[in-house]
Image: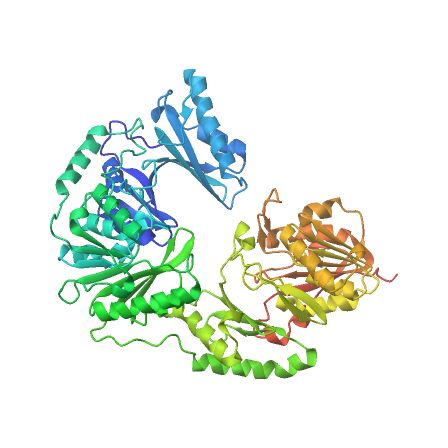
């Protein structure tokens, strides 16, 4: 366990956290504070150095969220392991018995699920140690404790750290007033760093923010221009009450920071505007608290009447702006706003560099300016990007996203290829395109005149800057090729889902569309979830279930929205049982049954973990469909589920309920899945994957795998 007592030059390991997307810039910044062995990691940067390096990071970092001092790393699969590992740390070296503490916790992919429970368990371990050794115990203080402890539990391995910052470093201390949806200070500073403001400021450049809100961007720009440490205004850091705190060292560093500070009074080089008088008033107050009001000129102005900037040499001007992008304005209003912003930039700022933060690439295109760079960032939970432009002298507007002739040809070709099959089978919901062209990495599904686009991460061979605009071209091309209006096209980002994220809502429109498949009707939701409620690749499997269901008792495990159960009921099943852990999906399944006029008396819907339900069952079934997720750690399970590891237990329990002459169909979308028949003695297992892949998924024969299980016949004597 590291200790800094009486060892100001001791080499120590630290970790600085940062918002997603800022890890690399933070690492570069840390090197400037004397940090050594800086290593970029998810969520921040690890480094080594003396205590002075960590203090400088707390005082001077404009990008970091927290600076942590790791104390111990150990396995914590159970609450008892967590408690014992934390109690093994000698907390008397860090905190007085009469002191105060707080514990924060973050958990990822671990057996212990609840961060609040883990924090309480850690607090108990620390308090029990003090009570046993000293007879007194520290108190708990959520606000400005003398010691703030950070727990990071990932994959059952716990890192215990002291939070030297004590509170998020984005809280500089100058924000007296604020308006709606302000940027965090460290994100504003990141926009400036990534747009080149420190270099421009050092060379006498000028910055303009035409939509400044409560002034975060211009104030952070002024602090950079004035070489002012962002931590100087803070009255509290986490190390103030720590027993390892070196007060003389901290006093020397703050004195040095005060000496470096430049006021630049009367030299206005930063100009900030907003149409809201209240926002400008708040920004002025915030700038006064920060001590930079002398180098910022604030003015109330709508973007349409924005005044021209001072004359400046080419390449010495920068506009950094964070316009709204969908949270507070209608989409049509936003398009008009971005077009107007682009026009004013072309009119007033020829030769200037532009940094634009937005969560919509489509809106960014409305500026009609030549793009130089795109850097993915996060504004809180919102995925955004910093778009970099340079306004040409005599700027000519770029045209908005235009349809791609290459993609249009492929879509038309696919429509022709599938036409005869669709007409013969009466198919109205189908996959039209699945990354056929690497430059356009997306899947396009058609639902009776509605389009659902799932954007994939582009392959490494594709320029990521160009890839960000591909989805705009896909949308424009699809609209033109299918004559499909924009309001009938839904776009989602398809990425690897982890844990509860696989069930997370992406939107909340709650808009359902009724579609037809195989003579049955289903409700699909194209906006709210990544999956729509109808897995199109399972269409042949559902038809097979319908053909096998007459007079059968049917069990649908991991039943989702009940589409397979609808097919079974329509095929004459005397009983269907649909089991799923999600109430949302089971309610959806019952709506699908009602939509098809199916008798609810002959059908059951069970909200429970499938494996737990199976273990208690004694009923038998003639036909069973098992289509589990690849991975799940839902709150209904005491342990996580991984299909490759856990399929033998799952399928043995399901086969136990299978009638002697019954059939079990097992399907999985896990592409690397391998089934070992030796786990299932007494069963004849047939791979029927090829028969369950329809023409619209023929390009991807591994979209799913499917096996049929039947009890093996007794050998003849």
Q: Residue furthest top?
A: 135
- Colour mode of the rendering: rainbow
Residue 361 can be seen in this image:
no
Q: In this rendering, would 369 be left or right of 493?
A: left
Q: In this rendering, would 375 be left or right of 233?
A: right
Above or below: residue 176 compared with residue 93: below
Q: How many marks?
A: 0
- Relative image position of residue 573 (x, y in whole percent): 80, 62
- Relative image position of residue 298 (x, y in whole percent): 22, 53
Q: Residue at x 23, y 29 (%)?
A: 247
Residue 644 can be seen in this image:
yes
Q: In this rendering, would 6 be left or right of 151?
A: left
The answer to which quarter of the image holds residue 150 is top left
Q: Residue at x 61, y 63 (%)?
A: 512
Q: Quadrant of the C terminus?
A: bottom right
Q: Residue furthest right?
A: 717
Above or below: residue 475 compared with residue 592: below
The answer to which quarter of the image holds residue 427 is bottom right
- Relative image position of residue 199 (x, y in whole percent): 18, 57
In the foreground, 52 or 714: 52
In the foreground, 83 or 320: 320
Q: Quadrant of the N terminus?
A: top left
In the foreground, 151 or 230: 230
- Relative image position of residue 602 (x, y in whole percent): 80, 56
Q: Residue at x 29, y 59 (%)?
A: 321
Q: In this rendering, would 439 be left or right of 171?
A: right
The answer to which quarter of the image holds residue 518 is bottom right
């Amino acid at each position: 366990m590291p200790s800094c007592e009486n060892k100001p030059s001791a080499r120590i390991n630290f970790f600085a956290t940062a918002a997603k997307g800022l890890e690399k810039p933070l690492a570069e910044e840390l090197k400037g504070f004397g940090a050594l062995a800086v290593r970029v990691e998810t969520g921040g940067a690890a480094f080594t150095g003396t205590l002075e390096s960590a203090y400088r990071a707390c005082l001077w970092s404009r990008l970091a969220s927290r600076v942590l001092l790791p104390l111990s790393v150990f396995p914590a699969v159970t609450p008892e392991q967590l408690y014992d590992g934390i109690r093994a740390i000698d907390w008397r070296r860090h905190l007085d018995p009469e002191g105060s503490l707080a514990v924060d916790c973050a958990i990822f992919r671990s057996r212990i699920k609840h961060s609040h429970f883990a924090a309480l368990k850690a607090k108990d371990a620390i308090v029990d140690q003090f009570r046993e050794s000293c007879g007194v115990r520290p108190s708990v203080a959520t606000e400005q404790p003398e010691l703030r402890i950070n727990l990071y539990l990932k994959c059952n391995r716990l890192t215990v750290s002291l939070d030297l910052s004590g509170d998020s470093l984005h809280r500089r201390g100058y924000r007296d007033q604020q308006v709606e949806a302000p940027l965090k200070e460290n994100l504003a500073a990141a926009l400036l760093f990534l747009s080149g403001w420190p270099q421009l400021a050092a060379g006498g450049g000028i910055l303009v923010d035409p939509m400044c809100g409560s002034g975060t961007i211009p104030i952070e720009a002024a602090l950079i221009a004035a070489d002012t440490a962002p931590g100087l205004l803070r009255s509290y850091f986490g190390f103030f009450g720590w027993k390892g705190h070196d007060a003389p060292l901290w006093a020397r560093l703050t004195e040095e920071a005060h000496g470096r500070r430049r006021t630049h009074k009367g030299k206005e080089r930063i100009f900030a505007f907003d149409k809201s008088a209240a926002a400008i008033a708040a920004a002025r107050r915030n700038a006064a608290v920060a001590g930079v009001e002398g180098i910022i000129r604030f003015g109330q102005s709508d973007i349409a009447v924005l005044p021209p900037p001072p004359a400046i040499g080419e390449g010495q001007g920068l506009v950094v702006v964070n316009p709204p992008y969908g949270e507070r304005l209608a989409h049509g209003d936003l398009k008009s706003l971005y077009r107007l912003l682009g026009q004013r930039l072309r009119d007033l700022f020829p030769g200037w560099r532009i940094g634009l933060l937005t969560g919509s690439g489509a809106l960014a295109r409305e500026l009609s300016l030549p793009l130089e760079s795109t850097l993915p960032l996060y504004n809180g939970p919102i995925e955004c990007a910093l778009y970099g432009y340079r306004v040409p002298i005599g700027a000519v507007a770029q045209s908005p996203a235009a349809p791609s002739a290459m993609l249009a040809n492929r879509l038309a070709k696919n429509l022709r290829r599938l036409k005869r099959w669709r007409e013969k089978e009466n198919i109205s919901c189908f996959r039209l395109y699945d990354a056929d062209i690497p430059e356009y990495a997306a899947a396009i599904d058609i639902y009776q005149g509605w389009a659902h686009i799932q954007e994939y991460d582009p392959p490494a061979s594709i320029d990521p800057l160009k890839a960000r605009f591909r989805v705009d071209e896909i949308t424009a091309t699809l609209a033109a090729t299918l004559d499909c209006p924009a309001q009938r096209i839904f776009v989602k980002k398809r990425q690897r889902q982890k844990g509860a994220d696989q069930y997370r809502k992406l939107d909340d429109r709650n808009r359902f569309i009724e579609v037809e498949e195989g003579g049955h009707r289903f409700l699909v939701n194209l906006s709210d979830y990544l999956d729509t409620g109808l897995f199109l690749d399972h269409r042949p499997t559902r038809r097979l279930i319908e053909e096998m269901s007459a007079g059968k008792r049917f069990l649908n495990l991991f039943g989702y929205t009940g589409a397979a159960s609808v097919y079974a009921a329509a095929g004459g099943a005397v009983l269907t049982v649909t089991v799923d852990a999600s109430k949302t999906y089971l309610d959806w399944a019952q709506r699908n049954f009602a939509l098809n006029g199916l008798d609810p008396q002959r059908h059951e819907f069970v909200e429970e973990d499938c494996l737990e339900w199976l273990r208690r069952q004694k009923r038998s079934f003639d036909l069973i469909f098992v289509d589990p997720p690849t991975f799940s750690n839902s709150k209904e399970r005491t342990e996580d589920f991984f299909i490759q590891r856990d399929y033998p237990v799952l399928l043995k329990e399901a086969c136990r309920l299978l009638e002697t002459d019954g059939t079990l169909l097992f399907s999985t979308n896990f592409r690397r899945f391998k089934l070992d028949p030796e786990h299932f003695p007494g069963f004849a297992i047939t791979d029927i994957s090829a028969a369950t892949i329809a023409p619209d998924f023929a390009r991807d024969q591994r979209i799913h795998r499917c096996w049929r299980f039947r009890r093996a016949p007794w050998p003849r004597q």
